[in-house]
Image (tube, helix red, strand yellow):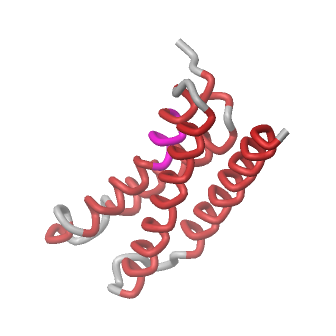
Amino acid sequence: MKRKHHDLHVWQEAMALTKDIYRVTAKFPREEVYALTNQMRRAAVSVPSNIAEGVARSSTRELLQFLSIARGSLSELETQVILAQELGYLNDKQPLLARIERSFGLLGGLINSVEKKVRH
């Protein structure tokens, strides 16, 4: 069964980011399983999940609220990626940060588009 959010490029990009985070955190030290690994995975999963939930809601106001939560999760994840490199768990944070930046841009574009429709 295909849902509306499956067609959104921002959701697809967020899903790819989430898979990247899972791959990278699988190599983190064992003692981080319940700490940074878990936090990063939860933040990453939150992004496509909130996009999907927002699209499934019945009002534009709710959609914007869930898109805003997704954007907050992206900011959280960005911070955690930087911390992971500073702790020596990541060799190169740039590919993840680039994907986060793409997701930010796509999400911002969707938010602007929805807000523009509300104003008109």
**Place of residue 38 in the rendered image (x, y in percent of width and height, measured from the top left):** 26, 59
Q: Is residue 9 above or below residue 108?
A: above
**Is residue 50 covered in magenta?**
yes
**In-image side of 25 versus 17 (left or right):** left
At 38% from the left and 53% from the top, the residue drawn is 22
Q: Is residue 17 above or below residue 85?
A: above
Main structural element of the magenta stretch: helix, strand or loop? Answer: helix
At 48% from the left and 33% from the top, the residue drawn is 53
Q: How many numbered circles does the render carry?
A: 0
At 50% from the left and 67% from the top, the residue drawn is 75
Instruction: Pick the quarter of the image with the C terminus.
Output: top right
**In-image side of 9 versus 91 (left or right):** right
Q: Nearer the viewer, residue 60 or 7?
A: 60
**Place of residue 31 in the rendered image (x, y in percent of width and height, measured from the top left):** 14, 71
- Residue sitting farthest toward the front: 119
- Residue sitting farthest toward the right: 120
**Is residue 69 covered in magenta?**
no
Q: Nearer the viewer, residue 52 or 18?
A: 52
**Place of residue 59 in the rendered image (x, y in percent of width and height, measured from the top left):** 58, 29
**Place of residue 28 in the rendered image (x, y in percent of width and height, measured from the top left):** 28, 69
Stretch in magenta: 47-52
